[in-house]
Image (tube, grey):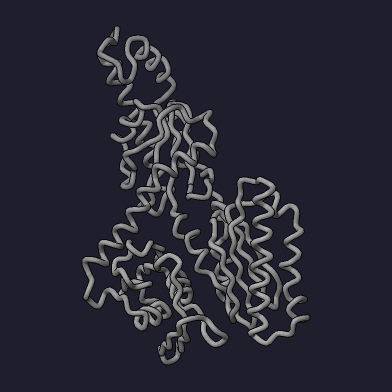
Amino acid sequence: MSVAIKHPLPRTIFENLANAHGLHCVSIYLPMHKDGKEQNARIAQATLKQCLKKVHKDLEHHEMDSQEIKKYLKPIEALLSDIELWRNPSDGLAIFLDKKGLNYYVLPISFEIKTYVSDHFYLMPLLPLYHEDEEYYLLELSQDYVKLYEANKYGYQDIYIEDFAPAQLEEAVGFDFRQNMLQFRGGQSFQGTETYQGKGEGKDDVKKELFTFFRAIDNGINKIISDKKAPLIIACADPLFGFYKEANTYPTLLENYIAGDSEFKNKTKLHQESWKIVHPYFEKIKETKLLQYKELVHTPKTSYQISEIVPAAMNGKIDTLFVENGADEFGIFDQETNRLMLRKKTDLNNASISDLSAVNTFLQGGKVFFLAPEEMPDPGQTMNALLRY
């Protein structure tokens, strides 16, 4: 019925990266300055060179031989001369290297510069890709044009609706519609004054026909969309929205809509307009979770203690994890004993437990939000958790 929207980094790739373990896993993040100016491309390349120097030193601390390091980092160095990579940048570049080889991804996030060498990849900077990709639906609507799209922040995909709903009004109400509508329009617009000339029932006939048409579309949409929590946005001429709203039974129809005839509108611009409407709706999810935390503070359903949060994340107990932007806690966690030893900074024997907690919360179905220090529900703590149980 439909094809999945192309995600900039499909979850399966993220899971493969999360499951990779071995000596000398290298993670590098940097901004790419995507406006395409040559000098900015050179800045990004210079940044990568500096990152390589830092990684080289870190690998020396891991007791790799200098010649071995040069050979090991050669695939990343080759990116510096990859003309296509720098000619077609996005916001950021994520690079991952281990004994199996190199993987790199051009992504719509302007990353903070970060290098990390450990027995696993550092994946926390990627998580906003998955918590800003909530699904929604966009319906283009007129009397003779119906299109439904599945969408998220990063793209949209046409859904074949014809088997479930009429493609134009005549299919729903019969071929005498057009003459009724033309007669009706001769005396009155949809939102005009009562100037209809002729039979008084003409206006009511048109309303009934529109209701029949829109209810048929609504029935189809309810069959197609299984997740009724996903919001639906309408793109239509101003007068039609009120008629559609009256016929609608889909529970998450948004009050805001895209006005105007969308049939000939650029679909990329239409998608951008729809995201502007739906984004505040998704932001409410974060606000709701923050409110839940504050209501449950000082109960067993919340925690700001890292010693509690890390084992809870590893064991799938976290509903929502709030992480302070730019903060990183380091330590050693023994999953068999649930014992955590904190360290002030990273070294050969420890790892980022912030990354560990965030990634495992996400992989086990929890939400992860990155907040400014003053936005944290328990300020002064780098991680706050809303627990499932």
Residue 69 position, x and y percent, is 73, 79
> In this orientation, which residue lies closer to the viewer: 223 or 319?
319
Q: Can you say whether 277 is above or below 355 in the image?
A: above
Name the residue at 70% across, 49% down.
87
Please name the residue shown 61% across and 68% down the image: 28
Residue 317 image-quadrant placement: bottom left
Q: Is residue 56 above or below residue 285?
A: below
Residue 221 location, x and y as percent? 41, 44
Front residue of this view, candidates 356 and 374: 374
In the image, residue 321 lies at what x, y percent? 37, 69
Answer left or right for 22 relative to 353: right
Horizontal placement of 307 versus 354: left or right?
Answer: left
> Looking at this view, is 256 or 347 the one in front?
347
- Count of numbered tags: 0
Quadrant in the picture for residue 17: bottom right
Q: Please determine whether, in this image, residue 181 is positioned above or below residue 305.
A: above
Farthest residue to the top: give it.
Answer: 197
Which x, y percent locates residue 12? 57, 66
Is 235 located above or below residue 134 in the figure?
Answer: above
Q: Nearer the viewer, residue 216 or 266?
A: 266
Q: Is residue 128 left or right of residue 53?
A: left
Residue visible at 39% across and 51% down in the picture: 230
- Residue at 26% of width from left, 61% of height from top? 291
* Farthest-out residue, bottom: 337
The quarter in which the C terminus is drawn is: bottom left
